[in-house]
Image (spheres, rainbow, N blue to C red):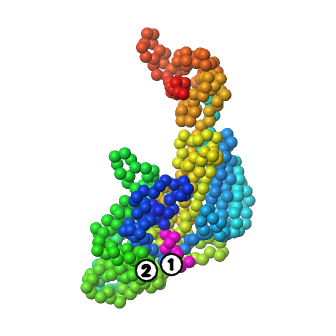
């Protein structure tokens, strides 16, 4: 794959078409700020320019193929029937992909989750089926659960699942800053290997080890914050403009402008470089910037000792030479070998790809194609709470998203998390004892949670009350009911003491009063 092709694979999670962008068939309309990122104007050019600047350290990153997972869920009482179809390939999920061999280690993990023998690793689609009660199998990676509570009034089901990622937020931020630190340390070592005893290197060393290190750590936090905002509900809040993600691109640009990494006067040239994707010109700008940090003024000619930054290929050659002998590269190779120990056809990464990985870990940018995920959940009723899309014609909740590849950077900032809560009323029982359906949706869910919190003695008393209710006597009996553990009502008191039964009484009375 050419460098230009690899560059196009770099995705900003909060940009239009980034790995967090939902499928167009089910997504909300983009905001004006989001539209600005995709047009040919200054904001869009700034994004493309930023992509180029990040790409300087990712000259050889590959990763076009990705995994695709399609999960179908069908609840059966307390059990959940689960079907997973997965494959690896290139191309859009909307068309027929060019299939590649699915990684054998992951096939083993999935087969184990379904208590099956692992199939051979081939360039084809695989389907696994199983039935699970409570915990989900973690086939794709992550953690999930289906909770089912049954009462005489109806049932409540809760489905929640996290797919891969890292929900240790403090650890995730710390890891990003550690990656930024390591990045700065390696860049400093690289420059030191090139300049050796250069009399002007002390100024550059001070800048890289101080200002640049600090600014990269701040960039990591800015990126994490912007991604979290982008993954949240983008609907504007009343009387408060939404803090949507494109604002963070402007914040980041302003941060680096204030600290002299570029000037407003440079913007037209940067925009042109971004549009024309002129890598040699980008490195010329970088070379001039490095010279300035060594005390060489813009009026002076850039010395030959900076020629290793004259083009992408020369920088790559120099960087490979330095990184090959570092402990960090050896650790990077060791981790790669562990991940690919059963794939004899895999090509080891070049040394410079270490900086690309560190940049990805620090910023959350996706330099490889993320894995794609679609989950469909059959539901007997429309959920009263979900972050998926309810399709009434198929009676399904559908989620589409992307997640980091196995062994890849933990992006996006928040792991993919899908949930749906729904309740199913026992219509025959409710009509027999109340004359109509009085609890459904959220009210039935609240009732089920309350009911499951009762003690054995309270359960027996409540069930006896329900059995005695009829449409003719329910108001009197319901109003008079108190658990034996409730405080007795004082004689002549205007108000009754609180009772454990107050919550369901209010829910049922509201249902009776409704249409």
The residue that disc 2 covers is: 279
Expressed as whole percent of the image width and height from the top left, the position of residue 238 reads 37, 45
Residue beneath the point at 51% across and 54% down: 27
The one nearer the camera, 378 or 500, is 378
Q: Determine if the magenta segment contains residue 364.
A: no
Up/down of 28 relative to 76, above or below: below
The one nearer the camera, 495 or 105, is 495
Q: How many C-alpha atoms fall within 10 Å of the one at disc 1: few (<14), some, or many (≥20)? A: some
Expressed as whole percent of the image width and height from the top left, the position of residue 440 reads 58, 33
Looking at the image, tell me whether mark 1 or mark 2 is earlier in sequence order.
1
The one nearer the camera, 189 or 422, is 422
Relative to 211, 88 lies left or right: right
Relative to 125, 268 lies left or right: left
**Magenta segment, which residues?**
1-10
Quadrant of the image containing the C terminus: top right
Residue beneath the point at 59% across and 41% down: 382
Determine whether the residue tagged by mark 1 lies in a helix, strand or loop. helix
Residue 338 seen in the current view: no
Residue with the most extreme bottom position: 304
Per the picture, the main secondary structure of the magenta-coloured stretch is helix
The quadrant holding residue 103 is: bottom right
Residue beneath the point at 67% across and 50% down: 82
The residue that disc 1 covers is: 3
Q: Are marks 1 and 2 in contact (CB under 8 Å)?
A: yes
Determine whether the residue tagged by mark 2 lies in a helix, strand or loop. helix
Expressed as whole percent of the image width and height from the top left, the position of residue 162 reads 55, 52
Expressed as whole percent of the image width and height from the top left, the position of residue 416 reads 53, 55
Tag of residue 207: none
Instruction: Give me the C-alpha separation between circle 1 and circle 2.
Output: 10 Å
Quadrant of the image containing the N terminus: bottom right
Residue beneath the point at 64% across and 41% down: 380
């Amino acid at each position: 794959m050419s460098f230009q092709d690899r560059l196009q694979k770099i995705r900003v999670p909060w940009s239009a078409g980034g790995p967090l962008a939902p499928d167009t068939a089910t997504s909300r309309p983009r905001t004006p700020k989001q539209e600005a990122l995709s047009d040919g104007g200054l904001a869009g050019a700034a994004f493309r320019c930023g992509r180029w600047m990040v790409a300087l350290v990712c000259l050889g990153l590959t990763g076009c193929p990705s995994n695709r997972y399609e999960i179908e869920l069908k609840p059966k009482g307390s059990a959940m029937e689960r079907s997973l179809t997965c494959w690896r390939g290139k191309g859009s999920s909307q068309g027929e992909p060019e299939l590649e061999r699915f990684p054998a280690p992951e096939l083993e993990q999935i087969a184990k989750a379904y208590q099956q023998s692992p199939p051979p690793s081939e360039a084809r689609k695989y389907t696994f089926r199983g039935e699970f009660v409570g915990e989900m199998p973690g086939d794709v990676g992550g953690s999930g659960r289906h909770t089912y509570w049954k009462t005489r009034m109806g049932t409540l089901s809760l489905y929640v699942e996290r797919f891969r990622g890292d929900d240790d937020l403090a650890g995730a931020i710390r890891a990003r800053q550690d990656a930024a630190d390591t990045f700065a340390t390696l860049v400093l070592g690289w420059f030191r290997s090139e300049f050796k005893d250069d009399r002007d290197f002390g100024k550059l060393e001070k800048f890289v080890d101080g200002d640049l290190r600090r600014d990269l750590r701040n960039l990591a936090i800015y990126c994490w914050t912007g991604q979290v905002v982008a993954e949240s509900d983008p609907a504007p809040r009343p009387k408060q403009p939404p803090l949507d993600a494109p604002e963070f691109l402007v914040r980041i640009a302003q941060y680096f402008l204030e600290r002299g990494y570029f000037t407003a006067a440079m913007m037209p040239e940067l925009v042109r470089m971004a549009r024309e994707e002129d890598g040699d010109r980008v490195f010329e700008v970088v070379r001039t910037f490095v010279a300035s940090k060594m005390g060489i003024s813009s009026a002076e000619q850039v010395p030959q000792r900076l020629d290793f930054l004259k083009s992408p290929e020369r920088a790559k050659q120099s960087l490979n030479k330095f990184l090959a002998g570092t402990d960090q590269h050896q650790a990077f190779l060791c981790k790669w070998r562990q991940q690919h120990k059963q794939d004899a056809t895999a090509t080891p990464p070049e040394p410079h790809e270490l900086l690309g990985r560190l940049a990805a870990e620090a910023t959350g940018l996706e330099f490889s194609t993320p894995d794609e995920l679609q989950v469909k959940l059959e539901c007997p009723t429309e959920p009263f709470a979900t972050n998926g899309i309810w399709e009434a014609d198929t009676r399904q909740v559908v989620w589409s998203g992307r997640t980091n590849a196995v062994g890849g950077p933990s992006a996006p900032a928040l792991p993919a998390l899908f949930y749906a809560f729904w309740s199913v009323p026992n219509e025959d029982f409710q009509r027999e004892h109340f004359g109509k359906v009085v609890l459904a949706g959220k009210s039935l869910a609240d009732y089920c949670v309350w009911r499951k919190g009762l003690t054995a003695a309270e359960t027996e008393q409540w069930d006896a009350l329900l059995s005695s209710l009829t449409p003719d006597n329910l108001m009197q009996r319901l109003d008079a009911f108190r658990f034996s553990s409730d405080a007795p009502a004082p004689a002549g008191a205007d108000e009754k003491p609180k009772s454990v039964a107050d919550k369901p009484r209010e829910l049922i009375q509201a249902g009776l009063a409704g249409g």
